[in-house]
Amino acid sequence: MRLEGRAQAGFYPTPESVLALIATHLGRNYNSSLLDPCAGEGVAAAKIGRQIEAHTVGIELEAGRAALSKNRLKQVFQGDAFDHKAEGFSLLFLNPPYDYTDGGERLEVKFLRHYLSSLVVGGVLIYIIPEHYLEAAKGVLTTWFDKLSIYRFPEEEYKAYQQVVIFGVKRGGALSAGLPAVEPLEGGEFEYRIPQGRGAEVYMAGMDEAQMVAEAMQGKAWNLLWDAVKVESLEGARPLLPWREGHLAMLVAGGLVNGTVIAHQGQRFLLRGMVKKNTRTVSEGNQTRETEYLTSSITMLDLKSAELIKVEEQSKELTPIEN
Ligand SMILES: C[S@@+](CC[C@H](N)C(=O)[O-])C[C@H]1O[C@@H](n2cnc3c(N)ncnc32)[C@H](O)[C@@H]1O
């Protein structure tokens, strides 16, 4: 089935009665941000967002539902959630389609893994899946979340898809632990504290090159370019090559490369830096665990030929935090 067709079929909104119960487990923070990468019509994200007083952001593949969710959420991106990345959010509300990927993995798990890095450390996960796929999600959940609770939908609502709602708090690093027992979903005591969001944003996962050139040729980057060209001393101020280990990461983190022009052997380059967080699965004996690492990259646009050159550097694994 095509992606849109699948989305059309995979719409099972969280029942309002269940949303009301979920809300009783959450604290409030008016500086918080909520992301729902499978937003549907936006009802669930709007209700939970109201409870925690969050800035609400949604992504939805199906155009009609995306349009409806725009009336309910602060910001909505229409498109495939796997073409987007996000970071800095306080709460991730994830009720993904219940299906297999073409590669035979559970789609629920692929969504969770992809959106792990959208949460700040201490951020709260609300994850709704059929109970029989808990085992498939166990690895990612127990590696990346503390304070896990698993609640079964009330009897009436459980009948359709046998769902559970999982609450968890994002860890600062990977660790292996077990899953708690499944309990009935009842009213809570606002026990999940919602942290502040940090520069929450959603962006296209892989900006294609044509888009990048187009972006460089207009707006802020273009103005910066001309400002930089006028300042003679900037030209050649930094060597283009060779890059020493850690160099890229430092330049990017220091914000030193966006919109800067450098000269090298008579050519001029416009630089753009980016840091992306990625995850990978590491095997240790017969155990596997998820780890995070950063990729720093600088893309250089040759201002004469409009050719793009990309230099990339990967960090070592982020150090797990021992609890
Ligand atoms: C189970 S519904 C959840 C709706 C809402 N979040 C809720 O809990 O009531 C899943 C939604 O994800 C959307 N969806 C499916 N695949 C998607 C994708 N790759 N990117 C973004 N949205 C997708 C479907 O169109 C559907 O509206």
Image (cartoon, helix red, strand yellow):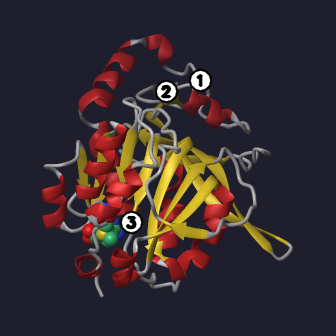
Mark 3–mark 1 Cα distance, whole angstroms, equals: 48 Å
SS at mark 1?
loop
Residue at mark 2: 262
Q: Is residue 229 left or right of residue 255?
A: left
Image height check: is 236 above or below 232?
below
Residue 87: tell me if it is visible. Answer: no
- Beta carbon of the mark 3 residue lies under 8 A of ligand 1: yes
Between 193 and 69, the one nearer to me in the picture: 193
Mark 1–mark 2 Cα distance, whole angstroms, equals: 7 Å
Image height check: is 2 above or below 223?
below
SS at mark 3?
loop
**Residue beneath the point at 40% across and 64% down:** 82
Find out whether the residues at labels 1 and 2 contact each other: C-beta distance under 8 Å.
yes
Image height check: is 238 above or below 206?
above
* Mark before the other along the chain sequence, 3 or 1: 3
Residue at mark 1: 238
Between 174 and 46, the one nearer to me in the picture: 46
Amino acid on which the number 1 mark rests in the picture = Arg
* Mark before the other along the chain sequence, 3 or 2: 3
Q: Quadrant of the N terminus?
A: bottom left
**Residue beneath the point at 20% across and 61% down:** 41
Residue 157: tell me if it is visible. Answer: yes
Residue at mark 3: 95
Res 163 label: none
* Front label number (3 vs 2): 3
Ligand 1 falls in quadrant: bottom left
SS at mark 2?
strand
**Residue beneath the point at 55% across and 33% down:** 252
